[in-house]
């Protein structure tokens, strides 16, 4: 019995998580119980838990994970300021007259919100409250409409910047380094968040393309499911479209461009995104758009000029030209800070910033508590011999490296029915990723395949988070059966996306290879 204690521990974790008790406490509680049980039965060296303090300190000081709360804040500000509503309204009126046009607009808005917020729950709820009633009034099949809204919201997990990719980058980088140590290489390479953001760009757009093709084909073959909207929607003019779409697009370019171009770290780029989101929120709630544009332009110009021609005023050998440039930089900073101050004051007055900070603190605490508890769980699982068991299992799989990867992908997919992506990322993947990398799988490509698989976990019944988010926000005529039925074709499209990236690895490896 004692030789199977690691397997019993994992089964106990599943039961504890499904019991409804808070996830981080469930993970930590199972770890404590089995650490004591293993020590009592003499199958675990309890001194191994001395590394727990190191793990906690490493988590708190992790430079990669610091980007998570700032990206979450950026998304929360955009959500609370109702920018998603403006985007959905404009895009819906742009495409609504086409067969399947409202579905197309929801997918495109989902992609834009994914690249600017990265928060699945906020996107699904916003579109469930705004777009879903409009689609139903236009005569859309309830299942089709539910599936489109649910799936579009999950794009925030694969299109950067996303919390999943940040966590995955940290997990895969650690696994890559561990694999190199086990292969006898002590001058190890590390992987960056930027590489995973670059790797996920093309696959993310591939999924968007698959969704759009499905909507267009289904709209053609079964026009009754997605009729053109005949509910008095006036098409917006070019100026209105640009006013709604251009700010999020510029924000996306500022954040991702800074990371992929090597100008800023993910944490610095997230700070840029948070300031940009604050300015967008200020414009949305009534501050003169010219002041916002002037402030944003001043900050962008300051970043470009200071990066290309830095001035250090503390030096003794600077001349009048450097002083003039420094004064100009100071003027740009004052103009930018003035716009930020106006936006901050307006968002505080409207209590947008209060709600955004509350949402950020709640989500950040949940993520970091889960990661910390998972570190404790991993230590005990390793102490009970679980890591060696997993390695032996993967190495004995028929089909070699390919068979092992198929097995892991199936396990992750099945676990996605019951567990959150964070739990799978920080508990399961550290156990299997080093072995898969040693077998010869490219860590970047492997990370993207796992990311899409984990994204699918948001859609798989019975515990897919997107399904719950939409159920809470959907009109009364939408049943749980409609939602479950609607996501099935999109789960199939996710599988097609995984197959394409598996068959064509350059879809994931080309862009990071070019940029890094």
Image: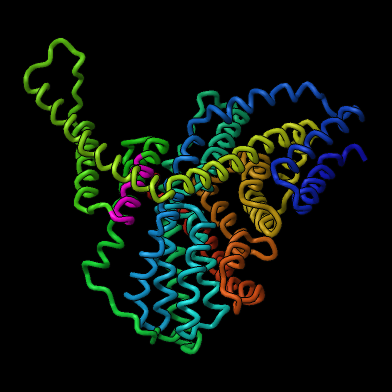
**250 inside magenta stretch:** no
Q: Quadrant of residue 147?
A: bottom right
Q: Residue at x 24, y 36 (%)?
A: 303
Provide residue 249's location: percent of width, then percent of height. Answer: 31, 56
Q: Is residue 304 above or below residue 44?
A: below
Query: Is residue 507 shown to the viewer in this render?
Result: no
- 514 above or below 230? above
In the image, 155: left or right of 259?
Answer: right
* Magenta-drawn stretch contains 278: yes
At a point 45% along the width and 37% down the height, the residue shown is 192
Q: Is residue 63 visible?
A: yes
For the magenta stretch, what is the residue range?
272-286
Nearer to the camera, 13 or 236: 236
* Residue sitting farthest toward the front: 349
Where the C terminus falls, by quadrant? top left
Residue 8 x, y percent position in the rendering: 84, 44
Instruction: Indicate the position of residue 447 as horizontal and vertical percent values.
Output: 54, 47
In which quarter of the view is residue 88 placed?
bottom left
Q: Residue at x 41, y 76 (%)?
A: 102
């Amino acid at each position: 019995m004692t030789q199977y204690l690691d397997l019993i521990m994992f089964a106990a974790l599943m039961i504890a998580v499904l019991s409804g008790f808070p996830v981080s406490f469930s993970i930590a509680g199972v770890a404590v119980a089995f650490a004591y049980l293993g020590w009592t039965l003499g199958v675990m060296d309890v001194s191994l838990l001395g590394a727990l303090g190191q793990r906690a300190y490493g988590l708190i000081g992790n430079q990669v994970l610091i980007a998570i709360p700032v990206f979450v804040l950026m998304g929360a500000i955009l959500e609370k300021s109702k920018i998603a509503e403006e985007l959905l309204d404009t895009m819906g009126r742009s495409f609504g007259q086409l067969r399947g046009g409202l579905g197309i607009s929801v997918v495109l808005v989902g992609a834009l919100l994914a690249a600017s917020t990265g928060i699945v729950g906020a996107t699904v709820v916003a579109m469930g409250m705004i777009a879903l009633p409009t689609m139903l009034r236009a005569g859309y099949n309830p299942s089709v409409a539910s599936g489109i809204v649910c799936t579009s919201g999950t794009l925030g997990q694969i299109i950067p910047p996303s919390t999943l990719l940040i966590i995955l980058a940290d997990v895969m980088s650690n696994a890559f380094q561990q694999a190199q140590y086990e292969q006898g290489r002590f001058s190890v390479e590390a992987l960056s968040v930027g590489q995973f953001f670059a790797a996920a760009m093309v696959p993310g757009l591939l999924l968007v393309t698959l969704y759009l093709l499905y909507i267009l084909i289904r709209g053609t073959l079964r026009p009754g499911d997605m009729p053109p909207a005949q509910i008095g929607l006036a098409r917006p003019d070019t100026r209105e479209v640009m006013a709604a779409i251009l700010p999020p697009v510029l924000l996306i370019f500022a954040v991702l461009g800074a990371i992929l171009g090597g100008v800023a770290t993910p944490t610095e780029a997230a700070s840029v995104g948070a300031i940009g989101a604050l300015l967008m929120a200020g414009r949305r709630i009534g501050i003169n758009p010219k002041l916002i544009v002037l402030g944003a332009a001043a900050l962008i110009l300051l970043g470009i000029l200071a990066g290309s021609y830095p001035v250090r005023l503390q030096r003794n050998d600077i001349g009048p030209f450097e002083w003039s440039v420094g004064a100009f930089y100071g003027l740009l900073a004052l103009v930018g800070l003035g716009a930020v101050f106006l936006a901050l004051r307006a968002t505080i007055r409207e209590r947008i910033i209060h709600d955004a900070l509350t949402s950020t603190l709640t989500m950040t605490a949940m993520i970091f508590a889960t990661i910390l508890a998972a570190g404790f769980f991993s230590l005990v699982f390793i102490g009970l011999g679980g890591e060696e068991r997993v390695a032996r299992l993967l190495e004995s799989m028929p089909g070699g490296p390919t068979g092992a990867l198929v097995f892991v992908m199936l396990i992750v997919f099945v676990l996605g029915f019951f567990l959150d992506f964070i739990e799978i990322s920080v508990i399961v993947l550290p156990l299997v990723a080093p072995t898969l990398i040693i077998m010869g799988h490219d860590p970047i490509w492997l990370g993207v395949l796992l990311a899409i698989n984990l994204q699918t976990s948001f859609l798989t019944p019975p515990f897919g988070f997107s399904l719950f988010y939409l159920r809470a926000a959907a009109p009364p005529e939408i049943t749980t059966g409609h939602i479950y039925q609607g996501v099935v074709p999109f789960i199939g499209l996710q599988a097609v996306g995984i197959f394409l990236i598996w068959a064509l690895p350059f879809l994931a490896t080309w862009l990071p290879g070019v940029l890094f």
